[in-house]
Amino acid sequence: MEKLYAELINEKIEEKRQEMIRLAIDFGFTSQLAVQASQELDSLLNAAAFRDK
């Protein structure tokens, strides 16, 4: 079960990273959309780091 959760989080991290990159290219690195995606990515990364402790 824990491995499944880790795989899911890693998948979500990669999806959000790709979304953030696309938004930054399309709208600029400081656009509200890119910043929001970056913050969401941070939350996912924090969840993954907390999981590993």
Image (cartoon, helix red, strand yellow):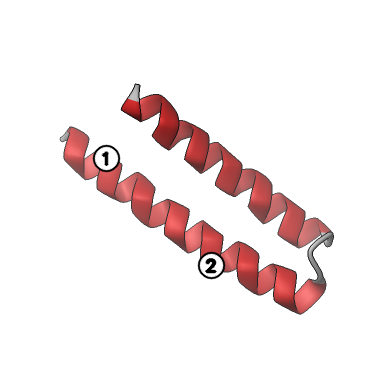
* Residue 46 percent across, percent down from the top left: 51, 33
Task: Give the number of the disc on residue 5.
Answer: 1
Q: In the orientation shown, which residue stands out farthest toward the top?
A: 53
Q: Is 24 left or right of 11, judged from the image as shown?
A: right
- The residue at 73%/60% (across/down) is 34
Left or right, 38 with reference to 47: right
Q: Quadrant location of the N terminus?
A: top left
**Local secondary structure at mark 1:** helix
The x and y percentages for residue 5 are 27, 40
Task: Give the class, few, some or many, for how many residues have Cα within 10 Å of label 1's Cα (few <14, many ≥20).
Answer: few
- Residue 7's place in the image compared with 22, above or below, is above
Q: Earlier in the sequence, mark 2 or mark 1?
A: 1
Q: CA distance from mark 2 to mark 1?
A: 20 Å
**What residue is rendered at 83% in x and 62% in y?**
31
Q: Amino acid at mark 1?
A: Tyr
Are dots 2 and 1 in contact, CB under 8 Å?
Answer: no
Q: Residue at 66% across / 44% down in the picture?
A: 39
Q: Quadrant of residue 43?
A: top right
Helix, strand or loop under label 2:
helix
How many residues crowd around disc 2 within 10 Å: few (fewer than 14), some, or many (20 or more)? few
- Look at discs 2 and 1 and give the one toward the viewer: 2
Type of the residue with mark 2: Gln
State the mark number for residue 43.
Answer: none
Q: Residue 26 sits in which quadrant? A: bottom right
Screen quadrant of the C terminus: top left
To which residue does mark 2 refer?
A: 18
Q: Residue furthest bottom?
A: 26
Q: Is residue 39 left or right of residue 18?
A: right
Residue 41 on image: x %, y %: 57, 48
